[in-house]
Structures are given as structure tokens and as C-alpha cells.
Image (cartoon, rainbow, N blue to C red):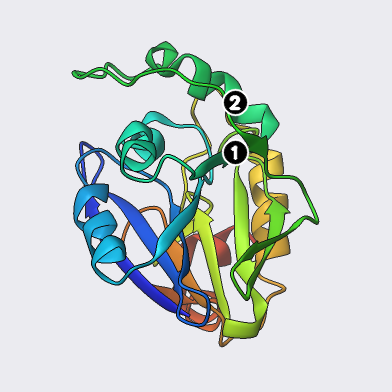
Amino acid sequence: MKIHSDAGGMAFTNCYLLLDETTHAAAVIDAPENTTAGLLELARAGAYRVDYLLLTHGHFDHLSDHQVVTDAFPEARVLIHAADEPKLLNPHASEFPIPYVIPPRRADGYLEEGQHLKVGTIDLLVMHTPGHCAGLVCLYAAAYKAVFVGDLLMAGSVGRDDLSDSDPALHRASLVRLMTLPDDVRVYSGHGPETTIGRERKGNPILRAWGIV
């Protein structure tokens, strides 16, 4: 498994390209504005097929480039948790002003708790981890000791739980669940640099203040 990333847009949000070198299957995880084109060109240059756009949740900064992905790879299926599909259907209902157009669309399918999604030979376990919003999911590649967490956890911080679609109690419960993963699991967040479960367990001041670690 290879992971490439880019970051950008209004909230400097991370986009990830997940590559299975065995089968040349690929998936894009989140699609912030103006971040996907270079990653898609990298996939095309390596003769990879992008099978999925996997949206960790429906906030606008994570799905702005969805049409860029599907224009480049029309067979790519756009998946999101059902609780956050309304944000994909009406991106401009966001509480934040968006100074560009995000086309609405339906999901091609849903990410559900306990689902095992295959990107070639890579197995991603879907963990429904609400709180930052109702439909946030983490994608855990246990065999590769990697987890994509959207805006649940960040290096030295956590995602916001004061938005109109947030639930602080669920957010904390989801963080408790995430921190049961092994220390050596690499954490790929929606914002900020890569970290590990162990690093956050030892040094994240918010997790410590909240009594989660």
C-alpha cells in the first residue's frame, strides 16, 4: 500500500490517494478544493484505476472536488455515511459561506459501521465515529497499521464539536474508541500532519484534559 497526499483549500484540508500496488486499484479519501488533480494525474501516470472516492464526512471542505474525481475516473463510486449524505446533496447549506460552486450529487453507496471495503487487496474497516458530525467515519487498514480519521483527531488536537451538526458527548465517545487502536497505528487526519495513536496517547493535551488517556 502506498499513500500520497495533498492539502489545500479554505481550511487547508488533506486529500489522500491510496494505491494498491498489487492490483493497481486506488481510492481517493476526501476531496478538498484544488487538491485532487495532481493526485489523479499521479494515479493515471501509474496506470491505476480509481475505484472509490471515500468521504470521511460531508463538510464542504472534504467534498468540494468530488466532481473532479469522477470526471477523471467516471467509474469511481462516491461513498459517504448515510447520515451525512444530505450535505452532499446540498453542499451550500453549510453554515460557512462558500465562495465557489460545489455541484450537488447523490452518493453511489454508503459507508456503514463494521463494513469491510476492499481497494484491491487493501481491506478498510469502516468505523462510524460520530460527534464532529453525525456521519463521520474512520477507515482502518489494520494490516498496514494506518487509519484515516477525517476530523475526529489531529496531531496535538481534536476536531471541533461546537458546530451545528456536532455532538460533544458522541465526539468524546468516538475518541475513546479510536484510542483503543494500537500505539503504532499511523493516523492520517483531515487537517495537519501525520501522527500515531501512541504519540497522541502520550502527548495530546486535549485527550489528557478530557480524561480520554
Circles 1 and 2: CB atoms closer than 8 Å: yes
Q: Is residue 56 visible?
A: yes
* Number of residues whose C-alpha sits closer than 10 Å to that of mark 1, classed few (under 14), some (14–19) or many (20 or more): many
**Toward which corner of the image does residue 7 lie, by quadrant?**
bottom left
- The Cα atoms of the two marked residues, 1 and 2, are separated by 6 Å
Question: What percent of the width, then of the height, locates residue 32?
Answer: 31, 42
Residue under pointer 2:
85
How many numbered marks are there?
A: 2
Q: Nearer the viewer, residue 66 or 199?
A: 66
**Toward which corner of the image does residue 166 lie, by quadrant?**
top right
Residue under pointer 1:
80
In the image, what residue occupies the spot 38% across and 45% down?
Answer: 73
Q: Nearer the viewer, residue 161 or 13?
A: 13
In the image, what residue occupies the spot 64% across and 45% down?
Answer: 171
- Image-based side of 49 in relation to 210, left or right: left
Q: Is residue 213 visible?
A: no
Taking 126 as reference, is 74 above or below it? Answer: above
